[in-house]
Amino acid sequence: MTFEFRIQDPSNQNTTYLLEEIIKLIQKGNLVKWRGIYSWTTGKTLSDLFIDDPDISEYVGHGKVELVIGIDTITTDYALIKLRDLNGQYEGFSSKIFNNDVCDLFHPKIAHFEFANGEHTLLVGSGNFTLSGLQTNIEAYTITTGTAEEISSISVWDDFVEYHKERIKDIDDDAIEKAKKNRIKVARRKRVLEEELPAEEEGAAAEILPNDVEVEEVDETPVSTRLAENSRVLIAQVPAAGGRWRQIHYNAAVIEQFFHAEANSHQRIFLKEARLDGSLGPDEVRPVIYSSSNKNYKIEVSARPEADYPEDGKPIIVLREMGVRNFLYSLILPGDHSYDSLQNFLDESESVGKGLKRVITDSTTLAGLWPDSSLV
């Protein structure tokens, strides 16, 4: 039996995010069941992982996933609707809710992975099943691996599920109605609302709370406070890539020196778009894909979906490092007011690696080039 203790620390280059640990276990190839019990999740997290992530979506298409999710707080009706959709979409996917009437807060964060060779792995830690808990927060977790005989306490999991079988319920209309109230309780937490609310529901953040609803005050930390005083920046031209230009191509030097990531691995790049109007896009979780046919490294982005690749000039992507493999970025097109300044800088600077111009600099330099950027 092996036991490892990890601290997920976005400021430490040697960190392994909890999400990356989960993906590493999936990539072993002989996983037969993945179980999780978490106090909350979000619809955005569920979509990014079970629908969009290539490794997780491939596994859930043939493997087994069993989740129990709390609805005391944070988990909204949108998250439960997404879980119910996943129940119907994948034959081996099963999710239920914990209807808590026994304590102040249902608060576990545990996962169990069972493999065909008889091996079991337990991930137990502080990170919830949200993009924050899985990659942007400082969290602690342990990894215990061994046979069922070596980790005999795995039976505690089954005992818990059996003991609370009347509280572990299907996701029905009553559960969804109960979770809907969490949208009001977290109305002050702008980032969660941005993940969850469709455009037609944006007014929910302004709902007046009933006098008998107790609301936990949540400190909303702007993205800007998580940026180092003078952090690293990449300014890079974006190739046309045969029309699939948002699958942005980089060379090996940029992947190694700036992104510090391995291609086609369990590691992920965490992105958030800083739009030109000052607003922020949703979290994006992307693998680094290496194509052996064209020898390119690709990281996809979601920015500027309405735009075609320009006939004159090349788009420019600007990424500012927020933490390990974690970046705030903007996608600039010819005609944008900042474009000429950034292009002139690229023309005058030494490029990193082969191919199009790609320059690693810092946020102080970026502020001089683009003073009103949301990245500085």
Image (tube, helix red, strand yellow):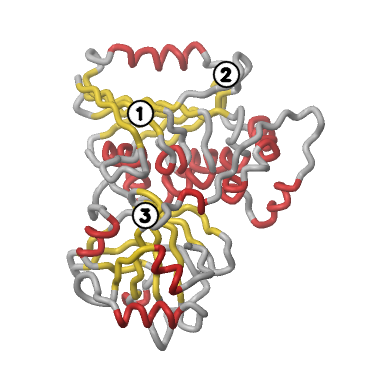
The numbered disc on residue 62 is none
Relative to 119, residue 262 above or below: below
Q: Which secondary structure lies at badge 2?
A: loop
| Residue on which the image places disc 2 | 167
Left or right position of 332 against 287: right
Can you identify the residue that label 3 sits on? 286
Mark 2 or 1, nearer chain start: 1
Q: Nearer the viewer, residue 167 or 371?
A: 371
Spatial CA span between label 2 and label 3: 36 Å
Q: Earlier in the sequence, mark 3 or mark 1?
A: 1
Residue 342 higher or lower than 185, as above or below: below
Residue at (35%, 74%) from the top-left corner?
A: 238
Given contact means CB atoms under 8 Å apart, are the residues at marks 2 and 3 in contact? no
Mark 1 element type: strand
User: Residue 234 or 167: which is nearer the viewer?
Assistant: 234
Q: Are marks 3 and 1 in contact (CB under 8 Å)?
A: no
Residue closer to the observer: 196 or 374: 374
The residue carrying pointer 1 sits among few (fewer than 14), some (14 to 19) or many (20 or more) residues within 10 Å by Cα, namely: some
Q: Residue beneath label 1, please? A: 141
Give, as a three-letter code, the residue at label 2. Answer: Arg
